[in-house]
Image (tube, helix red, strand yellow):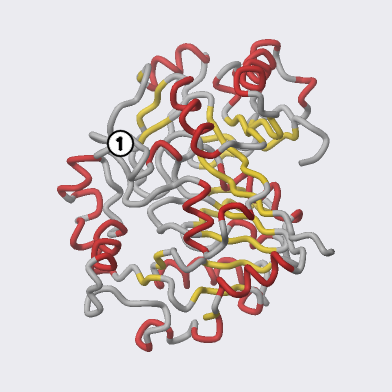
Amino acid sequence: MKKNGRILAVVGAQYGSEGKGVIVNRLANQFDIHVRVGGPNAGHSFVHEGKVYKMQVIPCGWTNPNAKVMIGRGALINIKMFRKELEEIKQVYPDIEQRIFIDYRAGILDEKFASMEGHTQGELHKRIGSTGEGVGAARIARIERNAMEFRLAKDTEYSEGIAHMLADTVKMLNEANIAGKSILLEGAQGSALSLIHGSWPYVTSHDTNAAQMAADIGLAPQLITDVMLVARTYPIRVAGNSGPLENELLWEELSERLGKKVEEKTTVTKKIRRIGGWDDNLIDRAVLLNRPTHFVITFIDYINPEDAGKEWIDELSPDSLEFIRRVEKQWGVKVSFVGTGGYEIDGQFHVAVPYEPTY
């Protein structure tokens, strides 16, 4: 009897910006299909062939020239942003339109929804630190069954130019799984930003954990074979009144501790992030909700700046190795990759070094 293909869900362990884009890109060639759900209020950055890419709609796994890339049924698509990303990718892979599929019932994130939220000048941003991209407003319209306000990708006025990419991705993904194809689910934001399980009301407008990701794309949760939880050594939250952050510190404090200037801005809002210390309770909850089979630890150079850009695990400092081993021992999950630095993206450094020979 033929075995179903493996399905890996990549989930942020904290408040997002853990470096999931880099990890997905690192794993891209190991999967036949890459799927993204969620909205464009989360940007995933990585470097491919020396160029920085910041994807808010299209899955980062497009870098695998043999993989299909899909935007799932539960996604919200900013068509203008999608077309911009598509043109960028065409510079590398002119045939990308032949292997990208958008679910015909995915939602359209019309610009009116962003206007309703006011982006980073709006009341929602001031109140809870929302990116103000209109994702929450669009989901409310969908819940209200407001067919005049909320439209699907298949609607004529939105499908112009993308009609040939529309498909029933639920059927495609289930058939691919039965055929033994491997699938990577690219999660957005982080477990602690879940509408249901996060620090409400300082949360996003949807659940962000592995089971919800499977539900959003039409796969039964029990089909997920692996969950990779990505955690940064110093978690961040977006700028503004964005909710609780354990052991919060100033960038100046961290810079002094590291002996070099560090500061991060969000991919979407371009505002300086808030940063805090490692929080065991945050990881406890993410582990409980997602039951990971693999860990990824990023920003290990925030533990010891001497580890920035290291490309081999045995080159890491004793401080960093001790931190990694403590994580493995405390939660009983193997660390598969460590982010050590090397490429600069918005003042951040990202390199995924295998902690084990292969995933």
Please provide percent x and percent y for residue 95. 67, 77
Q: Is residue 263 left or right of residue 342?
A: left
**Residue at horizontal 54 percent and vertical 48 percent from the top:** 45
Q: Is residue 212 above or below residue 149?
A: above
Name the image quarter holding the N terminus.
Answer: bottom right
Please tell me whether residue 174 is drawn above or below residue 280 in the rendered image: below
**Labels in figure, total:** 1
The residue drawn where x is 40% and y is 48% is: 207
Q: Residues within 10 Å of mark 1 (few under 14, many from 20)?
A: many
Q: Indicate the position of residue 328 as horizontal and vertical percent values.
A: 66, 22
Is 168 placed left or right of 130 in the picture?
Answer: right
Along the line of sight, which residue is nearer the eye, 79 or 291?
291
Q: Is residue 266 above or below residue 279?
A: below
Please give the residue where the numbered disc 1 appears in the rendered image. Answer: 239
Dot 1 falls on a residue whose secondary structure is loop
- Kind of residue sitting beneath label 1: Ala
For the residue pair 282 and 39, the one nearer the viewer reads as 282
The residue that appears at 78% across and 28% down in the rendered structure is: 312
Residue placed farthest to the left in the image? 123
> In the rendered view, would you say 221 is above or below 162?
above
Please name the residue shown 47% across and 72% down the image.
Answer: 83
- Residue 239 image point, x, y percent: 30, 36
